Every structure is written in structure tokens, then in C-alpha cells.
Image (cartoon, rainbow, N blue to C red):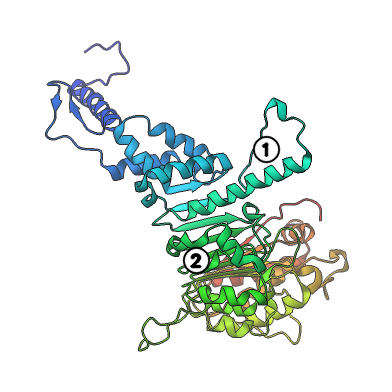
Amino acid sequence: MDSSNPSRPKGRGSTSAFNTFKKCGRMVLTALVFGRVRDNRNKAKNPHAVLVTVELLERILEFAVEDEANSISGSRTQVLSNISKVNWFWHSVAQRLLYRLITITSARQLKLLLRTISSESTLTTLISSIAVPRAPHVDPPSYPMWGMNISEDQRASDLQAKHLDCMQNLISLLKLPRNLNTLLLHSEAFDLFPESESLNAAKTTFSLSGLNSLSSVKGLTLLGDQNHHRWLWLIPFVTEVEDFFGVPCWLEKDEAVLIPPVTTWSTRTLTLKPGSSGVDHGMTLGIFKSMIAPPPPRNPTDSLSHSFLRSLDLQDTPVLGSKELPELLTGMTNLQYLRLYSHDRIVHKNLVFSLAVALPFLFSLRTLETNAIAAKPSPEETIPSFPSSLHSVTVSLSAVAWLQEEQADGPSHRGPKVGYIRKTIRRVLKIAKGSQLRNLSIKDCTLSDFLHFNIAGSAEYGDEQESAAQNKMWLMASQMNVLVDVVRPSYVVE
């Protein structure tokens, strides 16, 4: 063996091992490109060849486009389109991935996609998810050279007609999938949809009768600061929803349209977010109760089942201010994740009370995130107790501004908004006695409080009183096997 080549291994038998390694490498590359392994010595198919299965190639291609899965720029579509041109074997697999997740970004793309799927019915079974994360881009109308004198009113009318055509194409696309599982829509895609009073006319104008295919949707996401009428046409067709994420603004007059289909939902995940425009969004208590209630039994002899709800996330919604909130939370015995936030002073008081009443009855709760645990409770506040199943707690100090403007005790040089971190940790640890709490996180603290907690409480630079208090707190946490994490604020100016 030539010892001048350092890349080849040395020693007895190493030449055979090196050749075997190179042969295996060629076989793997050949398998990935041609879908099967060939024996290069006799130019014939190897009867012992290991085929690259469809499932294996599908996992490989999924990994190749994983970073583009949540992109709305269309790059995922471009990558899969290029992969499908490698050979016939890759084409069949890439096509399934290409049509499994459809993201609409422009009216032109929507029109071409609708024409392709309509001409090949087999593609309708591949569609699993449709996402419209923003309003589709609509190109302005084009005119010939001799049409430059068209009035502005005519141009606006032609542009509106193109928007209406885009909406119609989108509704037509929603009718095609046979196995649609998730649906994400942005309210800006339906800006020109008629008001709720014209809902019956809209059913005729946009031909909504064929939307029964949406009954297979399990995950529904409604984005944008929509008005209450935007989704009245959609909700009656989605009757099997399990995961809902939205920014709803549904009023009492909408209950007649929304409650019947919502009652049939088997809601497992419910997330209600506030609108970004500052408008008071939310839903009526009647719609919320219908959404979280267990579906009626299919047979009259069946007993009423418990709520299917496993995850609840409510942020600044009017439901948090309801007097029925404690009773509603107490009935969610299967709840495993709970996130409740309110930045309204009056609603926050009701949230603190509701949480203290309901927590002992949430026997399956594993994770809690809230800003309704005060560092120093008021005298009339009900003292909560954690269920034994609770494993992780995240407390936000965003409500400190109106809960306690200044500390009632401590040295005067600490000033306002200081010391809440230690007091909150100590109080949570006291409440958590008897539970399985293992992780405690404090976030949204002020910068001054964060610096005070880390500097004034240290043995080198802090004062003896604060250091002693923190040492006692850390001793309690270690005895309870609780990992405490204080998240550094992301801003530098309060």
C-alpha cells in the first residue's frame, strides 16, 4: 500500500475496509438519487438491494424544508418545486409535501393554484392545511396605452373588482380540500365582505353553499383586528374544531349565528388574544360558555361528558371580568395548561379572586402562567393554594404598577418598585407547599427591581438584611426542589 497517501488508512486489512467504505458511500448516494441500489459490477439490479422507502424520502424532504415551514415568502414552495424536478420518484413525494401545506400570499398565486387543483382532482386529498397569514397581494389593474385617461373612480372600481375576485377565488379554494385539518385566515383578506345584516345576500353573492368540506377542520386560527361580522359566514361551516386561536369581537346579536355551531366543538385548546389596534375585542359570555362546554351526547342514553379543554389562554378579554369566571374555571377539571393575563385594574381584581377560588379544583393542571399573584396580597384577598399536580409556574410582575406603588417596608434608599421579585418568589413557595412544583419563573419585572435583586441581595455588594432574606428564600426553594429563574427585562429604560 502506498504510504504516501495520508488519506487512506494504514495497517493490515485497511485497504479492504477503505474500499468497502467508498462502496457504501456510492450506494447511499445512488439510493437517494435513483430510489434504489444498483450493483455497478454487473450493471444489473441487486436482488439484495435496500430500497429507499417513500416514508424515508418524505422525512428527508421534510427536514430539507423545515426552516421554511413557517415562512410566508413562498420559499418553501420554491424549494419543493425544485426538488420535484429531480426524478419521477422525488416528484411523487415532493408533490404530496407541496400541496399538504398551502400558504396564500398573492391573488395571482391563488388563481393559478385554484386552476391547477380544479383540473386534477387527486390533489384535493393531499391538502391538509391552508394559511392566509395576511391579505393576498392584488396587482393594480393594467390598461393599454390608449386607456391612460381613465378616471380615478374607474380605477378604484376596477381595483375593488379584483379584490372581490380574489375573495371569491379564496372561498372557491376552501371548497376543494377533502381532508383539511388546519385553517388560518387573516381578516384583511375579507375586508370587502358584507356586513352581518347582509349575510344572507353574501351567501348568494359568494356561493357559500359548498363550504361543507370545512367540517373536517380541527385547528382554526383567525388573525387580525376583525370586526364582528367578518367570520359570521365561516363559523357555521366549521363544526368539529378542537384548537381555536383568535382575536374575536362577537356581540350579543351574533349569538344566534355562532352558538349552534360552536356548541358542537370539542375544544381542547382555546386561545383568545387582544387586538393590536387597542380596540376592546372579545366575545360574549354565552359564546365562551358554549365554546368550552362539552358537546352534547350523540345518543340520549349517554351520560354528559366532562369538558375536553386541555389548554386555556385568555389575555385581556372581557370574559376575565365576568362574575361567573370562578365557576367556569372550577369546572375545567381536565385542564393542563392555564394562562390568564389582565392589564385592567378592575378586571385584574376579579381575576385574582377567580384564580384563588378555582386553583384547588384544577386537579390535572401542570402549567400556570399569570400576573394575578401579588407579591403582597391585600387583606381581603383570598389566599390561593396550588393543586398537587402543578409542576411549573410563571408569574408576571406587569401588574406591579397599580398593585403597590411603593413598598410598605424596607430601607428608604430602595425606592418604589423594588423588592417585589423576592416577595413574589417567597409567597409562591409558601402557596406551593404540598404540590409537585419544580419550576418557578418570574418575568416582566422592572429594571430597578432586577438590579436590586441581583446586587443588593448579593453577599459582596448588598446589605445584610436583604442578603439574609434572600438566603432564607433560596434555602426554602432548595428544600422544596424548586428551580427558580428570574428573567432579565429586555429593555434598558423603564
Using the image as rendered, state which of residue 182 and residue 400 is in the foreground.
182
- Residue 253, horizontal then vertical, whole percent: 66, 76
- Residue 139, horizontal then vertical, whole percent: 64, 38
Using the image as rendered, state which of residue 278 and residue 263 is in the foreground.
263
Using the image as rendered, state which of residue 361 and residue 325 is in the foreground.
325
319 left or right of 235? right
Q: Which residue is mark 1?
A: 140
Residue 242's place in the image compared with 435, above or below, is above
**CB atoms at circles 1 and 2 under 8 Å apart?**
no
Q: Amino acid at mark 2?
A: Phe
At x 59% / y 77%, what residue is drawn? Answer: 256
Nearest to N terminus: mark 1 or mark 2:
1
Residue 1's place in the image compared with 245, above or below, is above
Separation of residues labelled 1 and 2 (CA atoms):
32 Å
Image quadrant for the N terminus?
top left
Q: Quadrant of residue 432?
A: bottom right
Secondary structure at numbered mark 2: helix
- Residue 277, horizontal then vertical, whole percent: 74, 58
- Residue 490, horizontal then vertical, whole percent: 71, 52
Q: Is residue 411 visible?
A: yes
Q: Amino acid at mark 1?
A: Pro
Q: Which residue is mark 2?
A: 237
Q: Quadrant of residue 301?
A: bottom left
At x 46% / y 60%, what residue is drawn? Answer: 210
425 left or right of 299? right
Q: Is residue 232 visible?
A: no
Mark 2 Cα within 10 Å, few/some/many (few <14, many 20+)?
Answer: some
At x 49% / y 55%, what residue is drawn? Answer: 174
Q: Residue furthest front?
A: 146
Mark 1 Cα within 10 Å, few/some/many (few <14, many 20+)?
Answer: few
Between disc 1 and disc 2, the foreground one is 1
